[in-house]
Image (cartoon, rainbow, N blue to C red):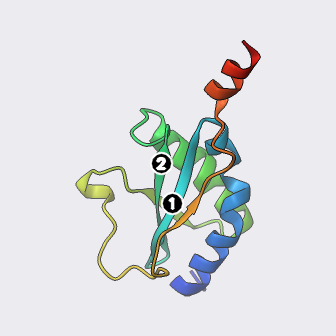
Amino acid sequence: MPFSDEDIYEAVNGHLPGVSTYVDSHGGGITLLGVKDSTVYIRLIGTCQGCTMSLMTTKMVVQKELRRVIHPELNIINDDGTPENTPPEGLFKVSEPVIVQGSNEGWIDKIKRIF
């Protein structure tokens, strides 16, 4: 990929609020952990953390959209606590993880307001 990890980090950081709309609608959020060797490491938080559909959300929502707006070969890994998805040492990142979370009102909260 023709971009540095810093370039990819900045691009993902800039586009993540737009990408997180689906995750936000389910009461979740996305933490940008960092980039290593053109692979972006995130953590789904809120109701999306530990959800059985988190792999599908990561690949079919987050990765698909970031590939569309940044680069078609971008790879996104959700740090879900499993050893194979643990971020490696030496990630490019800012000092604190970037957390992108919408209104914190997921679909359950919206239903509660209706009733």
The numbered mark at residue 62 is none
At 33% across and 57% down in the image, what residue appears? 85
Position of residue 34 measured from the top left corner of the image (x, y, whole percent)? 46, 73
Point out the tag, 1 or 2, that comes first from the N-terminus.
Answer: 1
Residue 27 position in % (x across, y down): 59, 38
Q: Where is residue 94 in the image (x, y as percent from the top left)?
A: 49, 81
Q: How many marks?
A: 2
Disc 1 residue crowd, few under 14, some 14–19, many 20+, Cα 10 Å? many
Residue found at x 47% / y 41%: 54
Residue 109 lies in quadrant:
top right
- Callout 2 crowding tier (Cα within 10 Å): few <14, some 14–19, many ≥20: many
- At label 2, the amino acid type is Ile
Residue located farthest toward the left when viewing the structure as drawn: 83
SS at mark 1 in the image: strand
Residue 45 image label:
2
Location of residue 45 in the rendering, given as x and y in whole percent from the top left corner? 48, 48
Q: Label 2 near label 1: C-beta < 8 Å?
A: yes
**Please, is residue 111 above or below residue 18 in the view?**
above
Instruction: Say whether residue 44 is left or right of residue 110.
Output: left
Looking at the picture, tell me which residue is in the foreground, 44 or 109: 109
Q: In which quarter of the image is the C terminus?
A: top right
Instruction: Tell me the residue that label 1 is attached to.
Output: 31
The structure residue drawn at horizontal position 69% and vertical position 70%, both measured from the top left corner, is 70
Residue lying at 43% horizontally and 43% vertically, measured from the top left: 49
Amino acid type shown at disc 1: Thr
The N terminus lies in quadrant: bottom right
Q: How far apart are marks 1 and 2 (CA)?
A: 7 Å
Q: Above or below — where is 79 with respect to 74? A: above
- Residue 101, placed above or below residue 66: above
Give the SS element for disc 2.
strand
